[in-house]
Amino acid sequence: MNFKLTFLYDGGCPLCLRETNFLKKKDTKKFINFVDISNNYFPENFKNISYKQAMDNLHGILGSGEIIFGVDVLAYSYELVGLGWIYFPTKLPILSNFIRFLYKYWAKYRLKLTGRDNLEKICESKCNIQ
């Protein structure tokens, strides 16, 4: 199947999982391939994205092979499911910068905010930290 987006998400993160489940329900045309990076079958390196990189920041892979990150993954996902208007503020320069700043903060602290071990601890059994 030719997906328009492969969406890498952390199924161990309760808030990430909630967002992903919402998108899965809305993706009636099956444009998005959802890949749970917390799954034991997720390889150490998926299309040149390491587990650690995927855990550090939200990644999406377009049908063309281009990799997008963070808010851009969410904005494109919502566009694909017909709810692109929700992320319209990311197209406005001043709001876009603020939203990206907030997302970077979330990405940096999401493990701690959701009561999980830090990335180094999680990676002890899942990846090689370089």
Image (cartoon, rainbow, N blue to C red):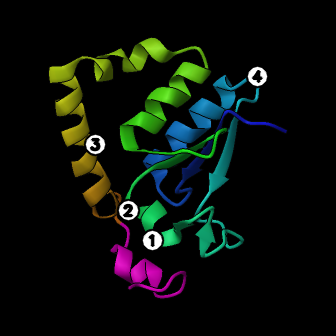
Magenta residues (range):
116-130
> Circle 1 is placed at which residue position?
52
Please determine whether, in this image, residue 39 is positioned above or below residue 125: above
Residue 76 percent coordinates (x, y): 51, 28
Q: Which comes before the other along the chain, label 4 or label 2?
A: 4
Pointer 4: residues within 10 angstroms few (<14), some, or many (20+)? few
Q: Quadrant of the N terminus?
A: top right
Q: Which comes before the other along the chain, label 3 or label 2?
A: 2
Q: Quadrant of residue 20?
A: top right
Q: Amino acid at mark 1?
A: Lys
Pointer 1: residues within 10 angstroms few (<14), some, or many (20+)? many
Mark seen at residue 103 = 3
Assign a secondary structure to mark 2.
helix
> Circle 4 is placed at which residue position?
29
Mark seen at residue 56 = 2
On screen, residue 16 versus residue 81, left or right, reads left
For the point 52% across and 70% down, which residue is it? 50
Please indicate, yes or no, whether residue 113 appears anywhere in the rendered image: no
Residue 97 percent coordinates (x, y): 18, 32
Assign a secondary structure to mark 3.
helix
Q: Circles 2 and 1: CB distance less than 8 Å?
A: yes
On screen, residue 79 versus residue 90, left or right, reads right
Q: CA distance from mark 3 to mark 4?
A: 27 Å
